[in-house]
Image: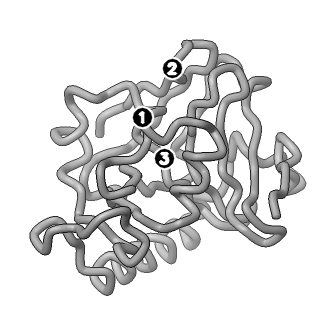
Amino acid sequence: MPEIKLKCSCGKVKGKTKNVNESSGTRIMCCCDDCQSFAQYLNQESSVLDQYGGTDIFQMPISNIKITEGIEQISSVRLSAKGMYRRYTICCNTPIGNTMGPGVPFIGVIHNFMDNASTRDEELGKNRGHIQTKFARQEVPTELKGSSLKIILRSLSKLIVWKIKGLNKPSVFFDDNGKPIAKPNILN
C-alpha cells in the first residue's frame, strides 16, 4: 500500500502515512459547520474549502500517521469542551486533521496536509461525495452528494475493525497516558 508524504505549507512539519489506499479508509467532502469554522479559525477558508464549503478529508487509522519533523509545531483546537480535536500547525496554520479521544483509532486527514495533490485520486480514490450538505454554502448538485447512510455505515465498520486491531496506538497526537501532545484551545 502506498505511503503518502505529509507536509504543512511552509515545510516545517513533515510526516508520512503507511498502509493507505482507497479501501483502507474513506474519502469524503465534509460540508459541516464545524469543518467550516475550523478553516475560518485558521484563516484558511480559501485553501481548505471548496465552493460548497466542503473539506476534502481522508478518514484513516490514527496509528498510520507518523510525524518525522516539527512535532513541536503541532497544536489543536476544540470547538466545544467535548468536540473533536482539530489539529493544525502553528507555524503556518495548515490544518492537519480531526481526531476524537485517545481510545478512538480515527483521524480525518485534511487534504492540505497531504503532499499528493497530483496523485490524490489515484492513491485515495475519488471522494464518496459531499456530506452534511445542509451546511453547504450553496446548493450541492445531486451528482456530487454522497449517500450519508452508506458513508456512515462504511466509517463505523472501519472504526470497529480498527478498534479491534488496536489501531489507536501508537498515536503521534496522544501520549501513552492518553493525554493530548498539545493542550487544545477550547473555543466557545
Q: Around disc 2, counting alpha carbons within 10 Å, would you say few (fewer than 14), some (14 to 19), or many (20 or more)?
A: some
Give the residue at mark 1: 47
Q: Badges 2 and 1: C-beta atoms under 8 Å apart?
A: yes
Give the residue at mark 3: 109
Q: Label 2 sits on what residue type?
A: Ser
Q: Label 1 sits on what residue type?
A: Ser
Going from N to C along the chain, the mark reached first, 3 or 2, is: 2
Residue lying at 39% horizontally and 56% vertically, measured from the top left: 53
Give the residue at mark 2: 9
Q: Around disc 3, counting alpha carbons within 10 Å, would you say few (fewer than 14), some (14 to 19), or many (20 or more)?
A: many
Quick one: 183 or 131, which is closer to the camera?
131
Kindly report which numbered mark, 3 or 2, lies closer to the viewer in this rendering: 2
Across and down, in percent, residue 154 comes to 34, 76
Determine whether 67 is above or below 153 in the image: above
Horizontally, residue 138 falls left or right of residue 118, namely: right
Distance CA(mark 2)–CA(mark 1): 11 Å
How many numbered tags mark residues here?
A: 3
Determine whether 92 is above or below 174 in the image: above
Going from N to C along the chain, the mark reached first, 2 or 1, is: 2
Horizontally, residue 16 falls left or right of residue 179, namely: left
Q: Residue furthest bottom?
A: 149
In the rendered image, which quarter contains the N terminus? Answer: top left
Residue lying at 26% horizontally and 46% vertically, measured from the top left: 124
Kindly report which numbered mark, 2 or 1, lies closer to the viewer in this rendering: 1
Across and down, in percent, residue 182 comes to 84, 41
Across and down, in percent, residue 155 comes to 41, 73
Going from N to C along the chain, the mark reached first, 1 or 3, is: 1
Across and down, in percent, residue 173 comes to 72, 44
